[in-house]
């Protein structure tokens, strides 16, 4: 809803009919409910264990669930090969898995029965316990298809963010864990970490016994760098001599354990209280205590070495001493297809011990960044000089690129920090819900781009920079739900034009951002991800369907995010988040691979902390795209680099028109109008000539020109849903979406309207011509005003009031008071930049509107204002 100074309101619409608004805020909130038979996973997250995934998809479609669905394989765990011909089976995000990072068995020789997982205890410096004996899972461990497992959703527990990285080199029989602990609280934390699990299973294969340690004895001491255990099948007095019934293993704890390793506890019970051995001696928990100051990250690096059985050939099953039991054995019979290959007694125990000694002396550090190495505290490592402190908070793309070029950080480190921040603030704490899905390959992509940089190749200013896309923009490999339960399983067949361009530029796709459903709305509410919180106050509106993108960038969850705009959904969210954005000239950038809303108005654009970043994006994505006919003239109007044309002195001598009739919105608030007087002074101080502009009959012309081309929404959705489909491939239709029963009421009404009969033949041509003539007439109002006074641009508020709360604004007004038709209904370029704060707290922005194809000039004017004022104020980091 919009209003002129006289208080007359006009609504944003995609058709000539004003759509009735219906809140979905009153619907049952699936993200706050646990379906019957499901367990929340991870703790305080908005997702559930994959064992109930089908029920969750049907009822909930929650954001994190989509991330997991993108990585799921139809098995309980993920297997990766090891040098002994066996495998590691890791509890990752596979269906029915624990997502803990533990090793299920370690192969057919069964050296483990669930080992390598974590338990955590968090205390204050005064000894008060905040979390006791917490079993950690829900790391979002994503397998890169080769040797690495990465935490995409680090776990937050009592102010400590825990991130797991697992490396399983195919040419070895060991596994490396690097577990990082970041204190995001305001005071120091004492963190007790228990790492371990079951290196056997009671008497099955023989009871677990310590064969040796780095100190040469059989007692686990705080000074030990490694511990070798075997499964004492024959109860020998000297376990080093074997045989080990199932495979032996060595647990390499580090070369600097004194003061950190406190004891061995009972991992089956409470390892922080109960000593090892407990009832079952297989369950060993190595307990470390870390003191972590606020803002600091420390890491523990451990290795697990495994061996083969010394009593049976793992190509078959193992001998089972129990006979005539009530339950038939579930294991295959022992190998009998030839001569069994069984190592000599003690041979495998000696082998894993020797490997442990070698790792203790020369740990395998392959693939770790300098920052990761410097954070490891339980090893004496060569060249442990800590890199200079670096954070992604408030960094722009050029600043990140400078840090990458200088070696101050890596793309992998940047992605890890963004993921930690998402765990801290987006899924927990203030729970902003800006991100709907995360790319499980983000860290793997970052490592690949770091390797390219190391080899001397830098593709563009976005090389190795994380970006995100609103979840109505197709990104290959990730779902595009449009925020609707009806499309939680929708996987695009191709990248959108924007995503493809950014990939070519070397950007890392971090994930998809939350939005209004389809996105038919202004308040950031989706049935998949819930309500998006404003970056400055989670109880307030983000003021447009690209709110997830705006909140994500403003809170430093990602460097740049892409949104879409049919009217208001770029400018208002950016303005309310103290960010910059651009709606380009219609036809400068492609909409291919984007869910349509109004085929004339629809635009895709970046949201960033600076105008320079907007220009850098256009350098990568502007131009002709055969899939979008509106771009056919784009190349004729792209003259060199948009970024290179930015001039901080561009306002000097420029003529700027101020449109005062756009100062006050429907609520009648006048803070924006008062702030605009300051903007006028700032423009003049920067050297601009400022003149008042009045556009006659603006409301009447708006009403005559609004709406959409007849039949365009149905045609556009049909094209979108079939994009990239092969011959005979099943293609969704609007009818399918309506029949699903999963659409929000507003979405269902709009799709129903799209299916209404449209004119045909001459009537259709006449109606279409009338629509486009109306838009040309509306555009001429603004162009004529600029021509009459020889103006370079018009300026007006982006947001005309403070943001509403989530409680009432949607139902009362249907949208936030702001401007949008000036660009959306004309196709003229519009750049929005921060312009101060309302009430000293709530961000306010202004928009520069230029002539067709004057995008470079408008960007330069906005850049000059930004550089003269520096109005961007970061939100509170809490």
Image (tube, grey):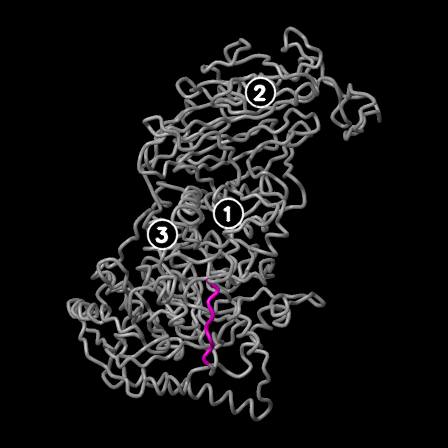
Which x, y percent locates residue 267? Answer: 54, 24
Q: Nearer the viewer, residue 561 or 749?
A: 749
Residue for badge 2:
250
- Label 1, residues with CA under 10 Å away: few <14, some 14-19, many ≥20: many
Mark 3 vs mark 2: which is more N-terminal?
A: 2
Q: Are marks 1 and 3 in contact (CB under 8 Å)?
A: no
The answer to whether residue 502 is left or right of residue 404 is right
- Label 3, residues with CA under 10 Å away: few <14, some 14-19, many ≥20: many
Q: Secondary structure at mark 3?
A: loop
Mark 1 vs mark 3: which is more N-terminal?
A: 1
Residue for badge 1:
445
Which x, y percent locates residue 342? Answer: 74, 19
Magenta stretch, main secondary structure, is: loop
- Label 2, residues with CA under 10 Å away: few <14, some 14-19, many ≥20: many
Q: CA distance from mark 1 to mark 2?
A: 32 Å
Which region of the structure is painted magenta?
18-25
Q: CA distance from mark 3 to mark 2?
A: 43 Å
Pair 1/3: label in front: 3
Residue 24 in the magenta stretch? The answer is yes
């Amino acid at each position: 809803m919009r209003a002129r100074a006289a208080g007359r309101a006009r609504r944003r619409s995609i058709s000539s009919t004003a759509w009735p608004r219906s809140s979905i805020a009153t619907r049952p909130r699936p993200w706050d409910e646990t379906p019957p038979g499901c367990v929340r996973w991870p703790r305080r997250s908005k997702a559930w264990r994959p064992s109930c995934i089908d029920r969750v998809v049907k009822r909930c479609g929650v954001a994190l669930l989509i991330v997991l669905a993108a990585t799921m394989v139809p098995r309980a765990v993920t297997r990766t090969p090891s040098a002994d011909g066996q495998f590691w089976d890791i509890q990752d995000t596979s269906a029915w898995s624990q997502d803990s990072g533990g090793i299920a068995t370690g192969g057919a020789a069964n050296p483990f029965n669930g080992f390598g997982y974590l338990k955590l205890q968090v205390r204050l410096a005064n000894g008060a316990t905040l979390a006791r004996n917490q079993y950690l899972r829900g790391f979002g461990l994503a397998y890169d298809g080769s040797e690495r497992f990465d935490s995409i959703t680090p776990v937050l527990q009592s102010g400590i963010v825990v991130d797991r990285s697992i490396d399983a080199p195919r040419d070895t029989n060991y596994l490396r864990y690097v577990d990082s602990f970041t204190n995001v609280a305001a005071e120091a934390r004492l963190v007790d970490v228990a790492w371990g699990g079951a290196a056997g299973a009671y008497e099955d294969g023989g009871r677990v016994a310590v064969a040796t340690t780095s100190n040469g004895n059989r007692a686990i001491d705080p000074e030990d760098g490694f511990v070798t255990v075997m499964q004492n099948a024959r109860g020998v007095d000297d376990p080093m001599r074997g045989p080990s019934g199932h495979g032996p293993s060595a647990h390499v704890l580090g070369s600097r354990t004194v003061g950190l390793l406190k004891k061995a506890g009972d991992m089956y019970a409470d390892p922080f209280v109960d000593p090892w051995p407990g009832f079952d001696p297989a369950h060993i928990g190595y307990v470390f205590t870390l003191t972590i100051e606020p803002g600091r990250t420390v890491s523990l690096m451990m290795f697990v070495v495994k061996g083969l059985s010394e009593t049976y050939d793992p190509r078959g099953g193992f001998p089972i001493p129990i006979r005539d039991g009530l339950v038939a054995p579930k294991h295959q019979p022992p190998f009998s297809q030839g001569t069994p290959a069984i190592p000599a007694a003690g041979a495998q125990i000696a082998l894993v011990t020797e490997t442990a000694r070698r790792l203790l002396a020369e740990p395998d550090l392959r693939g770790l960044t300098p920052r990761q190495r410097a954070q490891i505290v339980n090893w004496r490592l060569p060249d442990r000089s800590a890199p200079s402190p670096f954070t992604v908070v408030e960094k722009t793309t050029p600043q990140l690129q400078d840090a990458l070029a200088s070696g101050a950080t890596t793309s992998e480190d940047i992605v890890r920090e963004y993921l930690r921040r998402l765990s801290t603030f987006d899924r927990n704490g203030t729970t902003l819900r800006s991100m709907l899905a995360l790319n499980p390959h983000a860290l793997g992509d970052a490592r690949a781009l770091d390797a390219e940089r190391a080899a001397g190749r830098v593709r563009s200013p976005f090389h190795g920079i994380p970006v995100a896309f609103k979840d109505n923009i197709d990104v290959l490999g990730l779902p595009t739900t449009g925020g609707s339960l009806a499309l939680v399983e929708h996987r695009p067949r191709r990248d959108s034009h924007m995503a493809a361009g950014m990939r070519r530029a070397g950007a890392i796709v971090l994930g998809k951002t939350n939005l209004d459903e389809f996105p038919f709305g202004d308040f950031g509410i989706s049935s998949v991800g819930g309500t998006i919180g404003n970056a400055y106050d989670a109880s307030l509106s983000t003021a447009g369907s690209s709110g997830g993108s705006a909140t994500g960038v403003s809170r430093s969850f990602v460097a740049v995010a892409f949104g879409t705009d049919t009217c208001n959904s770029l400018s208002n969210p950016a303005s309310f988040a103290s960010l910059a954005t651009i709606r380009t000239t219609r036809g400068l950038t492609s909409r291919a691979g984007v869910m349509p809303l109004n085929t004339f108005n629809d635009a895709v654009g970046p949201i960033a902390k600076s105008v320079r970043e907007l220009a850098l994006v256009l350098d990568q994505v502007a131009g002709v795209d055969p899939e979008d006919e509106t771009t056919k003239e784009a190349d004729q109007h792209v003259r060199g680099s948009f970024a290179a044309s930015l001039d901080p002195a561009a306002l000097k001598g420029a003529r700027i028109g101020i449109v005062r009739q756009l100062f006050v919105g429907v609520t009648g608030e006048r803070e924006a109008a008062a702030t605009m007087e300051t903007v006028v002074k700032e423009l003049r101080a920067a050297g601009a000539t400022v003149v008042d502009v009045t556009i006659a009959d603006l409301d009447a012309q708006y009403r005559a020109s609004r709406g959409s081309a007849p039949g365009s929404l149905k045609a556009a959705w049909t094209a979108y849903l079939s994009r990239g489909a092969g011959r005979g491939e099943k293609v969704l239709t609007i009818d399918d979406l309506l029949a699903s029963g999963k659409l929000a009421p507003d979405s269902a009404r709009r799709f129903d309207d799209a299916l209404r009969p449209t004119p045909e033949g001459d009537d259709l041509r006449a109606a279409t011509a009338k629509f486009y003539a109306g838009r040309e007439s509306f555009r001429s109002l603004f162009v004529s005003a600029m021509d009459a006074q020889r103006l370079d641009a018009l300026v007006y508020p982006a947001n005309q009031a403070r943001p509403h709360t989530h409680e009432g604004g949607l139902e009362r007004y249907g949208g936030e008071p702001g401007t949008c038709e000036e660009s959306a209904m004309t196709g003229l370029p519009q750049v929005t930049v921060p312009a101060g704060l309302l009430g000293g707290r709530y961000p306010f922005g202004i928009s520069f509107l230029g002539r067709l194809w004057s995008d470079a000039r408008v960007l330069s004017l906005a850049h000059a204002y930004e550089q003269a004022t520096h109005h961007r104020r970061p939100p509170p980091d809490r």
